[in-house]
Image (cartoon, rainbow, N blue to C red):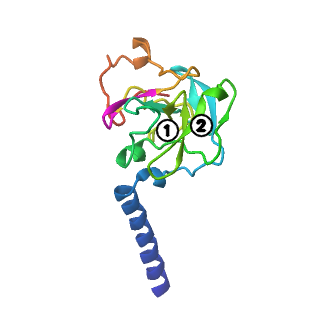
Amino acid sequence: MKRKITLFIAAAALSGAALAAAAFGDASSASPLPVSKGAIVALRSTALGSVLVDARGHTLYLFEKDKRGRSACYGACATYWPPLFSTTKPRAGKGVHASLLGVTKRANGNRQVTYAGHPLYRFIADKKAGQTGGEGLTNFGGAWDVVAASGRAVEPSASDSGGSGGYGGGYGGGYGG
């Protein structure tokens, strides 16, 4: 019985420590996905057209608040919008221009993948490959957009918005498959 209580207390302490680190630290270092050795950036067809995705097929986004290739997304922002990290040179998948791939150093020293000078992020609510739920959201002081192979933000047409008329921005307010 004592062993079960000890295991329960240890598990609770580890959970509490992880929550505290995410709440009070630079959440970009507590990303739910590990830092990859050489991140792969590829193209995938979605409801918004062909967009950049990571190695697992999850949509990649740019943050319009980022300036001069530097991330403006830290803390809680990086919890909801985990940066795409790479410890080595990122690799281009099919349809991606290798010349547009790069990295920028974050405040904590981690290397975030960039494309056409834009730091790249995932959206925590995109659970399945190809989902684009973060498109057009305005969280943490700026707009979020999926990225085309050209390096430009994909701007959906009115027919892609699901009839929302452009409303519904904020966490979880996007549409996607």
Q: What is the C-alpha distance between the residues marked 1 and 2? A: 8 Å
Residue at coordinates 60% horizontally, 32% vertically from top-left? 101
Q: Is residue 35 above or below residue 135?
A: below
Q: Please give the residue where the numbered disc 1 appears in the rendered image.
A: 122
Which structural element holds mark 2? Answer: loop
Residue 54 image point, x, y percent: 59, 37
Which structural element holds mark 1? Answer: loop
Give the crowd class for mark 2: few <14, some 14-19, many >=20 residues within 10 Å: many
Question: Which residue appears farthest toward the bottom when viewing the image?
Answer: 2
Q: Is residue 1 visible?
A: no
Residue at coordinates 44% horizontally, 31% vertically from top-left? 68
Residue 24 sits in quarter: bottom left
Q: Amino acid at mark 1?
A: Arg
Residue 168 image point, x, y percent: 30, 27
Residue at coordinates 58% horizontally, 32% vertically from top-left? 53
Q: Closer to the camera, 160 or 67?
A: 67
Q: Is residue 31 above or below residue 44?
A: below
Q: Magenta residues: mostly which secondary structure?
A: strand
Whether residues under marks 1 and 2 lie with C-beta atoms below 8 angstroms apart, the answer is yes
Q: Which residues are magenta?
A: 139-145
Q: Please give the residue where the numbered disc 2 appears in the rendered image.
A: 54
Give the crowd class for mark 1: few <14, some 14-19, many >=20 residues within 10 Å: many
